[in-house]
C-alpha cells in the first residue's frame, strides 16, 4: 500500500468511528431540547396554577400564559427530527398524525389562553385553564416516565 492509500484508509476509519459518536451527540441534543421545551410547558402550567390558587401574583398571568403559548408553538418542531429517546414513547412517531394533531390543538388552545389573559386577566383565564391543559391524554399514550 502506498502512503496515499494508507492515509485515505486511515481517514475513512477515523470518520467511521467518529460519525456514530457525532450522531449520538446530535440525538442527545435533540432529546435534551425536546425535554427542555416540555419542561417549560410544565413549569408554566404550574406557575399559572399557582396564580389561579392565589399563591403567586395575579399580575403575572399574562406573562406566564404568553410563555406557555410560545413554548407550545415550538413543541411539535422539537419532535420532528423523529429521534426516539428521553421520555417519548415510540408511539409518538408511529402515530404521528394523531400526535401532531393533539400538539397543534394544544398550541392553538395555549395561544387562545394567552389572548384571553391579555384581554381579560386572571378571572377570564380561570375557566379556560382546565380546557387548555389537557396534557394527560397525550402523556398516557406518548410519554413514559423515566
Image (spheres, rainbow, N blue to C red):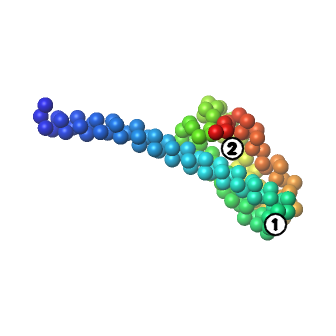
Residue 16 position in % (x across, y down): 33, 36
Q: Is residue 140 left or right of residue 55?
A: left
Q: Nearer the viewer, residue 124 or 31?
A: 31
> Residue 103 got which mark?
2
Is residue 73 visible in the rendered structure shown here?
no
C-alpha span from label 2 to label 1: 27 Å
Is residue 115 visible in the rendered structure shown here?
yes
- Other-residue count near label 2 (Cα within 10 Å), few / some / many at <14 / 14–19 / ≥20: some
Q: Nearer the viewer, residue 103 or 53?
A: 53
Q: Earlier along the polypeptide chain: callout 2 or callout 1?
A: 1
Q: Residue furthest left?
A: 2
Which type of secondary structure does the marked residue at label 1 adopt?
A: helix
Which type of secondary structure does the marked residue at label 2 adopt?
A: helix
Residue at image location 61% in from the left, 32% down from the top:
90
Residue at image location 61% in from the left, 51% down from the top:
36
Q: Is residue 137 above or below residue 114?
A: above
Q: Nearer the viewer, residue 117 or 59?
A: 59
Q: Residue furthest front?
A: 146
Q: Nearer the viewer, residue 106 or 133?
A: 133
Residue at image location 57% in from the left, 42% down from the top:
80
Q: Quadrant of residue 49?
A: bottom right
> Residue 58 got which mark?
1
Residue 135 position in % (x across, y down): 75, 44
Quarter of the rendering occupied by the N terminus:
top left
Quarter of the rendering occupied by the C terminus:
top right
- Mark nearest the camera among 2 and 1 is 1
Residue 111 position in % (x across, y down): 73, 55
Amino acid at each position: 500500500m502506498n502512503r496515499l492509500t494508507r492515509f485515505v484508509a486511515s481517514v475513512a476509519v477515523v470518520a467511521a468511528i467518529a460519525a456514530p459518536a457525532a450522531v449520538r451527540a446530535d440525538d442527545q441534543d435533540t432529546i435534551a431540547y425536546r425535554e427542555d421545551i416540555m419542561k417549560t410547558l410544565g413549569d408554566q402550567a404550574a406557575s399559572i396554577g399557582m396564580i389561579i390558587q392565589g399563591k403567586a401574583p395575579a399580575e403575572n398571568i399574562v406573562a406566564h400564559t404568553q410563555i406557555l403559548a410560545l413554548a407550545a408553538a415550538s413543541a411539535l418542531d422539537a419532535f420532528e427530527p423523529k429521534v426516539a429517546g428521553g421520555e417519548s414513547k415510540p408511539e409518538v412517531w408511529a402515530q404521528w398524525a394523531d400526535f401532531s394533531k393533539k400538539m397543534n390543538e394544544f398550541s392553538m388552545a395555549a395561544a387562545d389562553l394567552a389572548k384571553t389573559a391579555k384581554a381579560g386577566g386572571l378571572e377570564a383565564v380561570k375557566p379556560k385553564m382546565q380546557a387548555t391543559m389537557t396534557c394527560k391524554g397525550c402523556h398516557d399514550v406518548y410519554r413514559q416516565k423515566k
